[in-house]
Image (cartoon, rainbow, N blue to C red):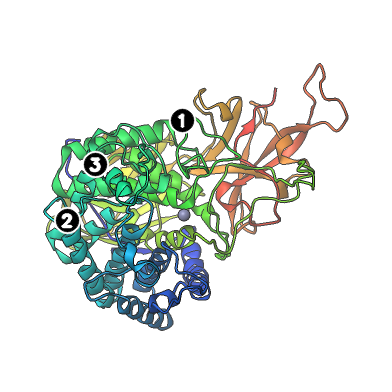
Amino acid sequence: MGQQHGKQVLFSQVKIDDAFWSPRIAVNRQVTLAHEYEMCRTTGRLDAFKLHWEPGTEPVPHIFWDSDVAKWVEAASYSLAAHPDPDLERKLDDITTLIASAQQADGYLNTHFTAVEPDKRFTNLRDWHELYCAGHLIEAGVAHAEATGKRTLLDAVCRYADLLARVFGTGEGQIPGYPGHEEIELALVKLYRATGQRRYLELSRYFIDQRGRQPHYYDLESARRGEKARGDYSYCQAHLPVRQQESVTGHAVRAMYLYSGMADIARETDDQTLAAACERLWNHLTGKQMYVTGGIGASRSNEGFLDDYDLPDDTAYCETCAGIGLIFWAQRMLQLGCDRRYADVLERALYNNVLAGSSLDGRRFFYDNPLAAYGTKKDSQGRLTQTTRYYQRSEWFGCACCPPNYARLLSSLGGYVYSVYGDNRAAVHLYVGGEATLAIGSGQVTIRQQTRYPWDGQIAIRVSPEKPAAFQLALRIPGWCQSFRLQVNGQDVSDAPETNGYRLIERTWSEGDQVVLTLELPVRRVFAHPSVRACQNKVAIQRGPIVYCAEQADHSDPVRHLCLPEDTALQASFEADLLGGVVTITGTARAALPGEALYGPAPLTKPCPIRLIPYYVWNNRQPGEMRVWLPIAP
Ligand code: ZN
């Protein structure tokens, strides 16, 4: 990539004060965290750490329960760092003490394999989530220590990681295995950064390097269990050594966590072959496998990828966690190179697929995020009858990975806004109001953004170095933006040099310098590659980063009857009282004519008003049909 690596500006250095994001972060803090805590408590996930489970009793601590609690600890820790809350801090103290109390004398820490199946420890890395849970506990320990300075959980996960470093490897007496559900790789890099202990980085690199090698560990492991080998390990991205992988495969969340870990290791160890593999996988994913909402993983059956361009809309799986994983990966690719291709995808997934993951009230969640919903109801003979049962968010799930994942992303959002490259470039990846402190060269610079983005394209950025300092301010011009204006202290600098989609303003900055970036935000029609069969002769509407949909609550005709003439004028207007305040898009569409004719010589449609809302706010009113891709009216 031929450029300096970046350094993420951590969430703790970024204070968000933003009309769009602050209310959502407040709901996350005030409602979602409390709700998820109660869900973890009432389902037995917290009590599982007491290790009191007796055979024959319910509930049985599940193999992935530890990860749900760990993600909650992580989310709550980030939230606490940004917003002191004694009640939350007390809860965190209790939970981290409880988790640490479940640690075994040798450092092992897993509720299921301690209380339920103690003889099965590390015997099925392929299918069970032991190392995945370990990864989440490690992330939680790091976050909790960073937020509170308390080391209860951090010390425990260090001991656990030390055990894993002894158990796993290619040395004499070690297990030459690696996780079927990746996650620990990126977590160990965080642990390395938090502690400075290089052995955690080495263990992460081992898990990545060992993956997919022959003789295949999962063959050996299944033989030891007396089972037939599965043969194809593309489901968990272990079909080949990672540097030989050309295309994204299998389970989407696993893939995103693996690629995130690969990008981390590429950056930390300056490994060009690993960076090149990341780049190939990135191009494949974003060129052939990604939805317009930034959702990924089209299929429910493998919770992952289908064939290239196979992106059905109403059956799209697009797990919230997969979109979040894509954001994690994009953020790490941005540290390998300042390139808007990564930030554009990060923004697309964030404002659409992932934000749809929670209801506006913060109490209900989507696991999968389809791009169309028509409702289904089967009668007693199995016939589809009238559409009255619609897809909706749920309060919780048996497999509850998504809700706490959403919570931890929202409460650490500040960490995705900026990077510093080398000693002289500050990059703004996302336009989010608030204030950040960046270390550039030997000095500190405060950057304050003020904006009503994504509804309005004007972003005012105040740059205040401690003392006058020369550096580049790199501002992303999003790929969707056709026209923009850039000013510094009232002077036009729109022709500032551009590199990889960022405009570079290089000058000696002094206290209070004012940059104004104005991005044009027209309503845009978006068309898919002709190979995407589900989108042929259809159009999606986008404005800025926001993808729109038609929802039943705004229409008297069924949404599945609506189609959009190519030449229809579309108006954008801000509606303060609708769905927390959104820009809607209105115009005249066409809808099916009432009548009995199945076929006819002319299009069987009539004009009708249409109102499109942002995709991320759908299903916050009464349940009903929804559609992102609208047929183009004949
Ligand atoms: Zn999930």
Regarding mark 3 in the picture, which secondary structure is present there? loop
- Of the numbered discs 1 and 2, the one sitting upstream in the chain is 2
Instruction: Name the amino acid type tagged 3.
Output: Gly
Q: Which mark is residue 307?
A: 1
Name the residue carrying label 2: 174
Label 3 close to label 2 by CB (< 8 Å): no
For disc 2, the neighbor class at 10 Å (few under 14, some 14 to 19, many from 20) is few
The quadrant of the picture occupied by the C terminus is top right
At a point 58% along the width and 40% down the height, the residue shown is: 315
Q: CA distance from mark 1 to mark 2?
A: 38 Å
The quadrant of the picture occupied by the N terminus is top left
Q: Which mark is residue 573?
A: none
Left or right? Give the position of 233 relative to 289.
left
- Of the numbered discs 1 and 3, the one sitting upstream in the chain is 1
Query: Is residue 424 at all visible to an observer of this figure?
Result: no
The answer to which of 622 and 526 lies nearer the viewer is 622
The answer to which of 294 and 249 lies nearer the viewer is 249
- In which image quadrant can residue 157 be found? bottom left
Q: Is mark 1 within 8 Å of ligand 1?
A: no
Instruction: Name the amino acid type tagged 2.
Output: Gln
For disc 3, the neighbor class at 10 Å (few under 14, some 14 to 19, many from 20) is some
- Of the numbered discs 3 and 2, the one sitting upstream in the chain is 2
Name the residue carrying label 3: 337
Regarding mark 2 in the picture, which secondary structure is present there? loop
Q: CA distance from mark 1 to mark 3?
A: 29 Å
The label nearer to you, 1 versus 2, is 2
Q: List the single residue furthest toward the top.
A: 601
Instruction: Name the amino acid type tagged 1.
Output: Asp
Q: Is residue 37 above or below residue 184?
A: below
